Image: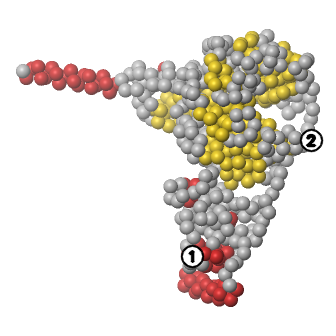
Amino acid sequence: MRRLLLVLAVLLAVVANISWAQETPHILSTSPTQNELNVPVNTNISVTFDKDMDEATINDSTFVVNARSTGLHEGTITYNNGTRTATLDPINDFDVGEVVTVVLTRDIQSSQGVPLDSSYSWSFTIRVNDGSGIFGSHSTYPVGDRPFSVFAADLDGDGDLDLATANWGSFALPDSTVSVLLNNGDGTFAPDSVYAVDPVPLGVFAADLDGDGDLDLTTTNGEPSCNVSVLLNNGDGTFAPHSSYEAGTGGHTLIAADLDDDGDLDLAVEQYIMGKVSVLLNNGDGTFAPYSDYPVGGYSYALFAADLNGDGYLDLAVGNVYFDSVSVLLNKGDGTFRPHSAYPVGDFVNSVFAADLDGDGDLDLVAGKSEVDSVSVLLNNGDGTFPLLSDYAVGDRPTSIFAADLDGDGDLDLVTANQTSSNVSVLLNQEPFIRGDVAPPGASDGSVTMADGLMILGYYYGETGLDCMDAGDVDDNGDVTMGDGLQALGYYYGDPGTAPEPPFPYCGIDPTLDDDLDCVSHTFCMDGRAAAPKPASVEGAFNKLVLQQAVVEDGIMRVPVLIWLSLKMCLAVLFWLIMMLLS
């Protein structure tokens, strides 16, 4: 009996040891982090695991880095056994401002031979060099007839960005070409080289489709073609004759992204007329399997791929023109997609973009609406759902939208191209605050107290500083004065007529634009999200800079004059005594 128990104990220990040894490895952290901004061009990329890993399985085919403009980046991969961290040191630097996507495939294994339970991907954005933001006069370069779209990428591998245009001509006389303009190295371009594609090319995209390290071209072609054309790069910025792949009814927009997380780039195309998205999975060599269709509503026009629910797979966001909505297709992890969720945003959605607009680590959506001259911002709930919607006016007939850190303050701003008004609209991302709430310094506490009034008076008398000048401008007249401090104190002592101007009593953005005040750090609104109720769309809110400005209205004191003057005198004396005691 004792021997039997001993044998059972040994067997249990062996089973337990096997169970432990075969635990699935997981990713603990990455660097750069998901959606990180302002990453240096010479950054290394690292990933830390929770198990000891088999170094031989972490290589260029399982640790894949693709950049939006410069394509595939290979490099030296090292593995630190002590920290369980794999690091890729890219051979070439990234280009400024480009989005980089990293894919870790399922072929990566632990030291016990257990693979990752699923592949994993994340993206980050490379820092933009300092610039004046002022542009010289434009230069013109001939291309084919009626170019419909343009893409900038390093097509000849010489380190500068070249251009490719899709030239659709007209429906009566389709051009059916792509023009490639190689950069001379100084921002000027050689005459275009023309490559035939299928009729009516509307969208063009550059990506390394065959995994050979150079960037290929693909176009989406409207009627009568209703397909995509693929031109593989010869390695020097010239291209082999195109191959064609059916894609439903064709559309205006296509993207290349690793939708099934196998290390190569697949294609997704919106079908305008049928209201569907076609997905073509890469066979691994730049050829593509037959397309799969996913309904999204009707008259889909815009398309964007991003990890919207944070599970490491690329999802799809689609703008539906006449259904006045944005559809979200969440990836199942294998390049197939769950049924779409539609989010109403208003008339004629013809552009869509995904970016972390509120700085909380997940990707939000912004949709351009050309018929109502506005954009809609949909903030992510963290799980790929979008309950918060805000609209912002822009110029006439916005046809394209993009998110980038335009003012260099570390958050993402928005820019739209406006067809009818022939200009662009810039919407700068605004820091939320509560008017009158300035204490404690660098944080605030979500309420207007005696400390806030005294701190504002202290600023007026030159004794203290303010992290958020906008919050100190209690009457919203564009200046921080003694009256602002006294108004805050009046409200604290129970006079409702002295309530601060909006945003108050909840977090919001400054409704006025033509003052010189700024809010550098007001962390209650950014970090204390559960501490107080707030209206929809607080972080990730925007003021429009280029096309119009709001009118500043002076705040009005509603306390009777004699009482107000007496209160000002008493509080001024009180403040002077406090300052004397502190000194």
Q: Between residues 279 and 288, which one lies in front from this camera angle?
A: 279
**Front of the two marks 2 and 1:** 1
Q: Residue 234: tell me if it is visible.
A: no
Which amino acid, mark 1? Tyr
Q: Secondary structure at mark 1?
A: helix
Say whether disc 2 or disc 1 marks the residue closer to the N-terminus.
2
Numbered label attached to residue 492: 1
Q: Please say which color scheme the image uses.
A: secondary structure
Q: Between residues 262 and 226, which one lies in front from this camera angle?
A: 226
Q: Residue at x 31, y 24 (%)?
A: 19
> Residue 376 appears at what percent x and percent y?
70, 44
Q: Between residues 114 and 419, which one lies in front from this camera angle?
A: 419
Q: Residue at x 70, y 17 (%)?
A: 248
Residue bearing mark 2: 137
**Residue with the most extreme left position:** 1
**Disc 2 + disc 1, Cβ < 8 Å:** no
Q: Secondary structure at mark 2?
A: loop
User: Horizontally, is 254 left or right of 535 in the view?
Assistant: right
Q: Between residues 437 and 225, which one lies in front from this camera angle?
A: 225
> Residue 68 appears at what percent x and percent y?
70, 30
Q: Label 2 neighbourhood size at 10 Å, few (<14), some (14-19), many (20+)?
A: few
Q: Residue at x 68, y 41 (%)?
A: 345
Q: Quadrant of the C terminus?
A: bottom right
